[in-house]
Image: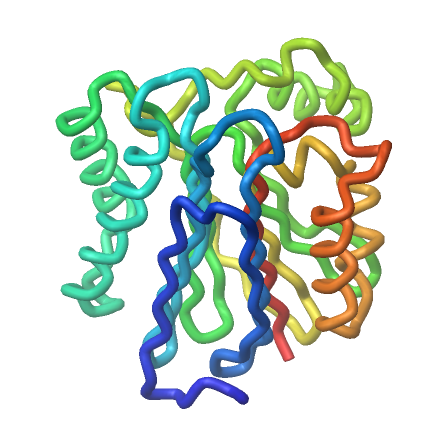
Amino acid sequence: MGQEKNEIKELLLHRISDHEAELFEWNDYKIGYFIQKNLAKSEENEDILFFYGKDDFCFFGVCDGAGGHPNAADASYLVGETIFQYVRTHKPEEFQIIEMIEKANDRVIEAFPEAFTTLSLCFLHKNEIRSYSVGDSEIQYINHKAEVLYNNIPHSPVGHAVEAGLLSQEESLDHNERYVVNNLMGDETLRIEACSKFKLSKNDTVIVGSDGIFDNLSHEELSSILSKKNFNSKFKELSEYCLKRDESWRKDDDVSFLLLQSK
């Protein structure tokens, strides 16, 4: 069933112990999300996934707590919680998203001084989308011709090497320093990547996801799946690939992603 235009849709998924997935409709968009704990790396899922939709706007995204640091899951949840507190108490015309992200960063530093997390966030108002990111969680806009309309730059030496043309994106998947991230929520000095507004056309698809998905699929492989017009089919194919984790799977990690397609 579709979401009523005046109905609020809220999701803030954290510490998911196995996996969770759902398909739903919101206004003029089809949406699917998937989140799954790593198989062996640790006992805790440090990814969160969130969606907040009201009237003609929505926020959605993921945070990936930095493994190897204390309170990583707490930090990622605190960022999501801060975003929810902000959007619940402000009107769209009042949104100052950079300030909201900075506030979330301040809260992480104060509450968990040794914790870090990524943030990849999309703000959709009517049919215009704008994206923001910190860290190496990724965002892509893809059309039905498998053309990548936008991809953020992962904040890592490998991510910048790909952007500079020193590495192909597929080669970067096997680079021995792919795990290095040099800009995260929790850093005292923060860089926030923001893109300009982009008008979504029919069948354009947006994916926002943690490195659990982007470390295991090349952009070419992902575009091939996401360019398919049938939303349910491509969501099912991507979800089943994550659940199966066959011999092509490169890295055991928490996986979270959200797909959105314009009807």
In which image quadrant can residue 238 be found?
bottom right
Query: In the image, 263: left or right of 135?
Result: right
Q: Residue at x 76, y 38 (%)?
A: 217
Of the pair 191 and 27, the residue shown nearer to us: 27
> x, y (%) of residue 201?
65, 71
Of the pair 28 and 46, the residue shown nearer to us: 46
Q: Residue at x 45, y 48 (%)?
A: 16
Q: Is residue 199 visible?
A: yes
Q: Residue furthest top?
A: 176
Q: Residue at x 68, y 66 (%)?
A: 204
> x, y (%) of residue 197?
48, 57
- The quadrant the N terminus occupies is bottom right
- The quadrant the C terminus occupies is bottom right
Query: In the image, 204: left or right of 174?
Result: left
151 versus 128 height, above or below: above
Q: Residue at x 62, y 42 (%)?
A: 151
Q: How many marks?
A: 0
